[in-house]
Image (cartoon, helix red, strand yellow):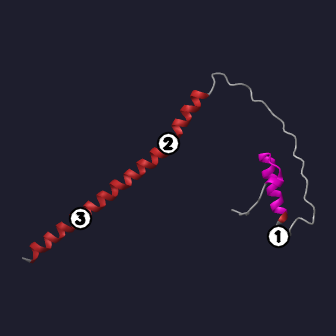
Amino acid sequence: MFWEIFTHALQTTGIGMGTTFTVLIVLWAVLVLLKFLLNTLPQKMQRKKNAEAAPAEVAAPVQVSMPAPAYVSAPAAVQAPVSGGGEIAAIAAAVSAYTGIKPSGLVVRSVVRRR
């Protein structure tokens, strides 16, 4: 009598655990498939659009020179003392040079150093 109940309990436990892990493996496979589809299909579609939009002949690249922006500093009475102001000014100047926006139009809210 005991062994019948014990074997029935083991069978039930085995079926329950087997079903649970099978479902987990199926969910994992679905997530991997979705990750693959969501990462590769848009890239393939973008490459296809680029290939269709690209002309048959590639023209030589044209170099365009932009005049260097004139930097004008604000009067000393307007500037507030900021620790690390030199770093912020250098970052603002670099962003200004890259984007072509005047430094007075930029606001550096925070500087985070990453290693």
The answer to whether residue 25 is above or below residue 44 is below
Residue range corresponding to the magenta coloring? 86-105
Q: Residue furthest top?
A: 57
The answer to whether residue 100 is above or below residue 91 is above
Q: Give the number of the disc on residue 16.
A: 3
The residue sitting at 56% across, 34% down in the picture is 47
Q: In front here: 18 or 88?
A: 88
The residue sitting at 30% across, 57% down in the picture is 23
Callout 1 environment at 10 Å: few (<14), some (14 to 19), or many (20+)?
A: few
Q: Of label 2 and label 3, which has the lower sequence position?
A: 3
Q: Could you tell me residue 67's position as x and y percent?
A: 87, 40
Q: Is residue 81 left or right of residue 56?
A: right
Q: Could you tell me residue 97's position as x and y percent?
A: 81, 48
Which is closer to the viewer, label 1 or label 2?
Answer: 1
Q: Is residue 87 left or right of residue 53?
A: right
Inter-mark Cα distance, 2 to 3: 36 Å
The amino acid at mark 1 is Ser
Q: Give the number of the disc on residue 40.
A: 2
The residue sitting at 86% across, 70% down in the picture is 81
Kindly identify which residue carries mark 1. Answer: 83
Callout 3 environment at 10 Å: few (<14), some (14 to 19), or many (20+)?
A: few
Q: Residue furthest front?
A: 78
